[in-house]
Image (cartoon, helix red, strand yellow):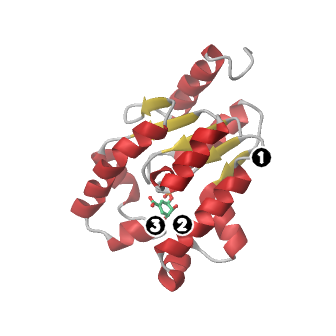
Amino acid sequence: MQAILIGFMGSGKTTVGRLLAQTLVTQHADLDDLIVESAGTPITTIFANYGEPYFRQLEQQTLINAIKRPGILSTGGGTPTVAANAAVLKRSSVPVIWLAATGETILERVQNDRSRPLVNDLDTESLMTLKRQRATLYANAADLVIHTDQLSPQEIVGHIVSWLTASHLVARA
Ligand code: S3P
């Protein structure tokens, strides 16, 4: 992978990942999509039928395989919060970019989306507590943090490409 995007649910990892891959003329992979593909069933069904620990096993194995591929990887909101996954990210030496957003922004984006089991199961307060707890873990995993609230996906991609270029991680256009 050329870059990995992390962040809480609704932080824009998939949208920005796709656009970043387009901009860098490379492939994009979404970890959740890869998990769904290999399990042959939606994430809500995996959680409901087999539980979160089983989902985390699938996630870890999928991450280990995905990280070897070229392109941009959008992770799931919980991916870097599992110690084994955080270790995989650190060992890979692929730049990890945290798309940070305020609670208000996140809630606006995820509240009416029924495809996220944790959003379905947790009330607003518990979801915001989870977001606070995860912030340190995202910070520990990240090489770059972008506060996305006031930025369009294009602007976020612009920041990422400038940073990758300045860090000599992509060739100057
Ligand atoms: C999760 C986030 C989801 C998905 C699963 C668990 C989490 O991904 O991996 O529902 O623990 O935050 P998104 O961040 O893409 O919604």
Which of label 3 and label 2 is nearer to you?
2
Which of the image's four quarters has the N terminus? top right
Cβ(mark 3) to ligand 1 < 8 Å? Answer: yes
Q: Is residue 25 left or right of residue 106?
A: right
Q: As displayed, is residue 27 above or below residue 78?
A: above
x, y percentage for residue 61? 66, 62
Choose top left, top right, bottom left or bottom right for residue 130.
Answer: bottom left
The residue wearing badge 3 is 116
x, y percentage for residue 33? 65, 61
The residue wearing badge 1 is 69
Q: Pick whichever of labels 3 and 2 is earlier in the sequence.
A: 2
Task: Tell me which amino acid carries mark 3.
Answer: Arg
Q: Are marks 2 and 1 in contact (CB under 8 Å)?
A: no
**In the image, farthest residue toward the bottom:** 49
Q: CA distance from mark 2 to mark 1?
A: 20 Å
SS for callout 1:
loop
Q: Pick whichever of labels 3 and 1 is earlier in the sequence.
A: 1
Residue at 56% x, 42% y: name it: 5
Of 77 and 101, the residue lying toward us: 77
Crowd rating for badge 3 (residues with CA inside 10 Å; few <14, some 14–19, many 20+): some
Task: Tell me which amino acid carries mark 2.
Answer: Arg
**In the image, farthest residue toward the left:** 125
Residue at 46% x, 67% y: name it: 116
Which of label 3 and label 1 is nearer to you?
1
SS for callout 2:
helix
Cβ(mark 2) to ligand 1 < 8 Å? Answer: no
x, y percentage for residue 80? 50, 50
Of 135 and 172, the residue lying toward us: 135
